[in-house]
Image (spheres, rainbow, N blue to C red):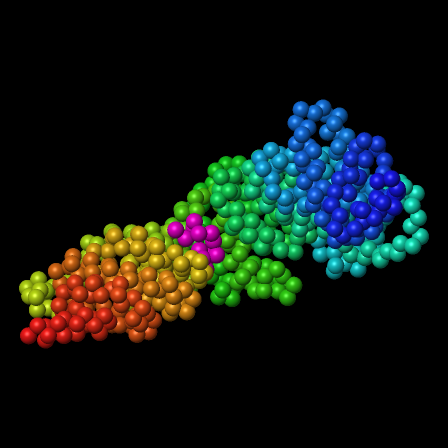
Amino acid sequence: MKSQAEVLNYFGEANSPNIFVCIIWKCLLETGRVNQICLQVLVKLGARALSKQIRVFADFVIHDYSLLSNGSSEDHTKRITCLHDMVWKYHIISIDRLVLCLMLRYCESKEAQVCNLLLRFLLLKIPAFRDRIHTFVQEVPPDYWKHSDWHQKHQAYHQKWGEKFYFEGLREATNASSHNVAYLPINFGNVCLRFLPVLDVVIHRFIELPPVSAGLESLLHNFGALYKFHDRPITYLYNTLYYYNHMLNQRQASRKKLVSVVIGAFANIRPPNWCLSNVFLENLNTDSEWKPNLEYYCGMVGRLVDTISGNSPFPAFDWRFHEFPSPSAHALYATCVELMSLPVNDKDIGKALFSILYQCAETSRGFEILNNSRTWINAIALILSSLPESYCKVVPQLISEALTNDLAVKDVTPITATLMPENMVTPSSFSYSFYSFQSNAAACSLTLPDLVVAFANAVWYHSSLGHLSLIPGLLRDTFKPLIQNEAQFLFACRLLGPFLFRFYSEKPRCLLEIAKELYAILDVVDKKCPHLYHIDTICDFFYHIKYMFVGDSIKQDIQHYIASLRPVLRNRMQFIAHVGHAREDTASVST
């Protein structure tokens, strides 16, 4: 291109290649200066096109650095200086936008290390941005909008650290006229507050990319104080710990540092017990290994129970402007954050939460748990259903334990059945009364199967549809091989019965799978047990499934099961698949 007009017309068009910022970078590297035509092109491009240019520039810079693996320190310093000038001297790119583009791009292992190197230079090595944050954190309170002198402090900050938004440095370097540029006053925001959501993304990316995980702790050390301005610190911690649970379980030090920095930013602002318990905070700042006991878990759940009951131990907030709408929501998320931060295996935490119910006599609030068992079960279920899936694996484990250890060795046969087993048709009194939890709790006679039924029902009740979708697979692969007698079968029906309508309305396919598996299990139990004493209850349950939910949709899949049942059971279930009528018709034709 021979003239500046051609350059302006070519790069200023909307469909032109998004490489002009890369060209400015190369000009600064080779000549150390920029031409006035650069300003004219950037002004013509506009903000939307400039965003595309910056994304391409982020790819180009990382590629350029990747080629310098054997380059001299002078080459690295020269590139970092040019990048610093584009941000802070010429004001071509803002630091928050550049860092966001660098972080959100796809990074392979080598590129991740290059990206980490760039961020370390931009954020840590060069003091331009770090000094701004230090000044803002020291001089401005977190609830700055409530202070009458906020505007004066903010203007004083901008006088010390002025911000430019329209290539002012580039105008000065090229001696361009700026008399026609009008600005709105900066009354509220600044680069520190704008960078806070970007910092959230940077931390997430550092967790995702193992090659750059070493830089996470240094980043938190230098920028962690900025979190005192975060409007949703517990929500951010909850989301981070939840979605990166598997990765952070393998990096306990990084998780501990993250929780310590975010919560520690409010150390002198909010009361000590505003989020995490005092016991946890005392062990958070020590290097020794800490294994919480049952009393600790009881205190955590008890805190949520007290809050739900209206006796919140948390300090009072103005819930109109708090990150959570109520004390109960605050208590639930704070409890989940603390449990996910513990240096304990996920399954062990789930078992400890159930042990609060099963071993309540060993806790200081055992009598309260016995008298108010439903509230405590509901609170524990709320916690477990709000934690990652790995914590909820305790539920199928407990069900399997109840099926294997308790119900497998118990018999529902009446005492007199040993005398006349072929004539006994009266239902027995169950050794485990699955259908009367409240009366058993009032009599302090709850057993493991009773607690497991109530516990599993409560957890599944609060769980999302994604969690419930796993139940058919659990029934088929885990529970079905364990069910061999009538007590175990009725136990499984008691577990699944309350959720049939939810499956029917939200996930009909899962309901059909569960119904088919129940028929298959009944066939096994019928073959294994010499006598069934709750035939009427079993038949009522299957007729309920047929006429309320599945109809004839699984008729072809279950006919062979019903046809192979013992006569007394087959006769009662003949209207489900019309097996009995079919046999009678065949017999009449043959005669």
On whether residue 487 falls in the magenta region, the answer is: no
Q: Where's residue 88, x and y in %?
A: 80, 41
Q: Quadrant of residue 217?
A: top right
Q: Nearer the viewer, residue 262 or 313?
A: 262
Magenta residues, dominant SS class: helix
Whether residue 371 is visible, yes or no, is no
Q: Is residue 5 left or right of residue 50?
A: right
Identify the image quadrant of the C terminus.
bottom left
User: Where residue 445 sits: x, y (%)?
Assistant: 28, 62
Q: Indicate the quadrant containing the N terminus: top left, top right, bottom left or bottom right.
A: top right
Q: Is residue 46 left or right of residue 525?
A: right
In the rendered structure, the answer to whether residue 342 lies left or right of residue 138 reads left
The answer to which quarter of the image holds residue 539 is bottom left
Identify the residue at image location x=34%, y=54%: 474
Magenta stretch? 382-393
- Name the residue rendered at 74%, 45% in the picture: 17
Residue that lies at the very extreme toward the front in this rendered image: 2
Q: What's the residue at 88%, 46% (across, down)?
A: 5
Q: How many marks can you see? A: 0
Q: Residue 377 vs residue 93: left or right?
A: left
Q: Residue 216 appears in which quarter of the rendering?
A: top right
Q: Pinpoint residue 396: horizontal percent, then vertical percent.
A: 34, 53
Please say if 437 is above or below 393.
below
Q: Position of residue 327 (x, y in %)?
A: 55, 63
Q: Is residue 388 inside the magenta stretch?
A: yes
Residue drawn at 58 percent across, 55 percent down: 235
Give above or below for 113 relative to 172.
above
> Is residue 401 something one can see in this rendering?
yes
